[in-house]
Image (spheres, rainbow, N blue to C red):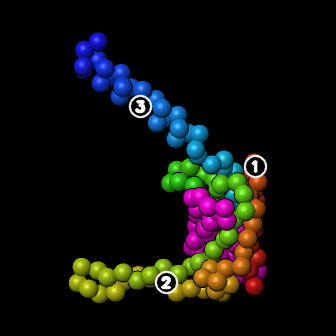
């Protein structure tokens, strides 16, 4: 075997081994969707975030006009890690500075702190399809 052939064989083995290991280390996911209401009214444009209690990657989604959301583990990959999660729900969007240094955009928080910065929400995500609604007071 030439040196080039040996290097190509080694590179191929590394690609195969690394590719297999990455799939085995991925957490098991389940779909999660639901609706967020505050005092019985749908909450639009709220960020819903599920953070695994045992560690791992969070999943998030945004509510539509009717308060409905679906979680995404990654940009085009729906779902959340199976297990217990701490949940935060927030409508806050920070202001940004435009090219002239003027503040633009932003939105104040309309959800009580017990559901975001001081969240007391916890839910279990189980295998399969999960419908988890939040009726906030």
Picture quadrant where residue 125 is located: bottom right
| Distance CA(mark 2)–CA(mark 1) | 35 Å
Q: Position of residue 124 (x, y in %)?
A: 76, 62
Alpha-carbon span between mark 3 and mark 1: 33 Å
Which residue is the site of mark 2? 107
Which quadrant would the C terminus be assigned to in this image?
bottom right
Query: Is residue 97 visible in this depiction of the protein?
Result: yes
Circle 3/circle 2 CB separation < 8 Å: no
Q: Are marks 3 and 1 in contact (CB under 8 Å)?
A: no
Residue at 40%, 83% in the rendered image: 95
Residue found at x 67% / y 79%: 119
Magenta range: 34-62
Q: Earlier in the sequence, mark 2 or mark 1?
A: 2
Which element carries disc 2, helix, strand or loop?
loop
Measuring from the top left, give residue 22's x and y in whole percent. 52, 41
Q: Is residue 38 above or below residue 79?
A: below
Tags 2 and 1 touching, CB below 8 Å: no
The answer to whether residue 104 is magenta is no
In the rendered image, residue 47, in percent from the top left (x then y), is placed at: 58, 71
Question: 96 or 3: nearer the eye?
Answer: 3
Neighbours of disc 2 within 10 Å: few (<14), some (14-19), many (20+) = few
Tell which of 87 and 1 is nearer to you.
1
Residue underneath mark 3: 14
Residue beneath the point at 58% across and 46% down: 26
What residue is pinned by disc 1?
127
Compared to 120, does 25 lie above or below?
Answer: above
């Amino acid at each position: 075997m030439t040196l080039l052939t040996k290097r190509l064989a080694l590179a191929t083995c590394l690609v195969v081994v690394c590719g297999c290991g990455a799939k085995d280390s991925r957490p098991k996911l389940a779909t999660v969707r639901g609706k967020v209401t505050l005092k019985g009214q749908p909450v639009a444009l709220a960020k819903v975030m599920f953070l695994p209690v045992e560690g791992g990657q969070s999943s998030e989604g945004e509510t539509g006009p009717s308060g409905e959301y679906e979680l995404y583990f990654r940009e085009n990959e729906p779902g959340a890690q199976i297990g217990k999660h701490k949940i935060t729900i927030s409508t806050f969007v920070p202001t940004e500075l435009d090219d002239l240094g003027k503040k633009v955009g932003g939105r104040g928080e309309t959800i009580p702190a017990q559901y975001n910065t001081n969240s007391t929400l916890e839910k279990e995500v189980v295998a399969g399809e999960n419908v988890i609604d939040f009726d906030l007071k």
